Amino acid sequence: MRVRFVLALLVASTSLFAASHPDDATGCKDHPLVTRMPGYFIYRCEQSPFDAWKFKDSKGKEMTVEGKITSISYNLVTGQPMPSRLQIVRNYENALKPLGGAIFVQYDDGAETYLKVAKDGKETWFYLNLYNTGSWGLQVLETAAMAQQVVADAAAFSNDIKATGRAAVYGIYFDTGKAEVKPESDTALKEVAKLLSGDPQLKLLVVGHTDNVGQLEANMKLSQARAEAVVKALTTKHGIAAARLKAQGAGPIAPVATNRTDEGRAKNRRVELVEQ
């Protein structure tokens, strides 16, 4: 029987279990927030500066968390006693409980366990893969917005619209499942306003797009709400006449990449400017 729990911590620093081991893979070490169970060494580790996790919460709702991911794989040292799955989970639980936490998400009787640290508006997620306690994995995701490396500006938007009638904007951000424009979107919105100010005759459809995760009807409503939020931001904060803009939600029906990968889904979650 599946049991699901949640862990929400108020403090984001601690040293939990054992120290390093001579057999640790070169360049590998425990995550700064948690060390390891006794009797283990690290045989593999890697980091991704930006990626995503997808899982279901206790109500069955699918969630996506994005940020920096650290992956660490532990092997039991030869001759050391093998702890049970429950023993490992309880060690993490008991070590973190004094910091003000409670358990967050757990699947398959603890074989997959998620824990979360929340402090100062930042979340750090821990995932324990304990199907084999002789060789198990820890992933730590520190939530963060992606560092935007492709910078779109008014000139690029103008060129795209002249060439294809539309321009994709990837610098407008929303929280998962929400339609409120996040403050870090302002740079992109200023460039859209600059585009419109530079061409007083230009009128645009502001089209919201989503990936295909979730129900079609919900995604259609979400994309419409996001498009309307962008129009509102342009008219109220950037002085663009409302008559020049029209919001339209397209949901997941016009993907530009596969929805089978995280990278593809990220490309599909976008705002497009379409010439009227």
Image (tube, helix red, strand yellow):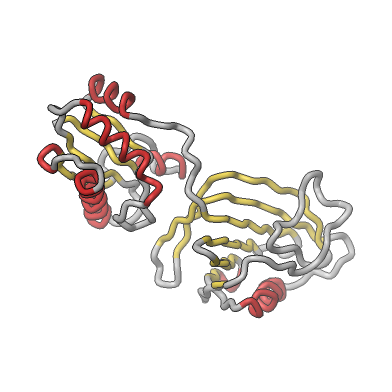
- Residue 103: name its quadrant: bottom right
Side of 8 relative to 215 (left or right):
right
Side of 147 relative to 211 (left or right):
right
Q: Give coordinates of residue 64: x percent, y percent.
A: 45, 56
Residue at point 55%, 71% (across, down): 106
> Vertical placement of 166 versus 142: above or below?
above
Side of 137 relative to 66 (left or right):
right
Residue at point 32%, 34% (across, down): 191
> Vertical placement of 14 versus 140: above or below?
below
Q: Give coordinates of residue 8: x percent, y percent.
A: 54, 72
Q: Give coordinates of residue 1: x percent, y percent.
A: 52, 76
Residue at point 21%, 45% (across, down): 231
Q: Nearer the viewer, residue 89 or 223?
A: 223
Assign the C terminus to one quadrant of the image.
top left
Residue at point 64%, 76% (across, down): 99
Side of 82 relative to 79 (left or right):
left
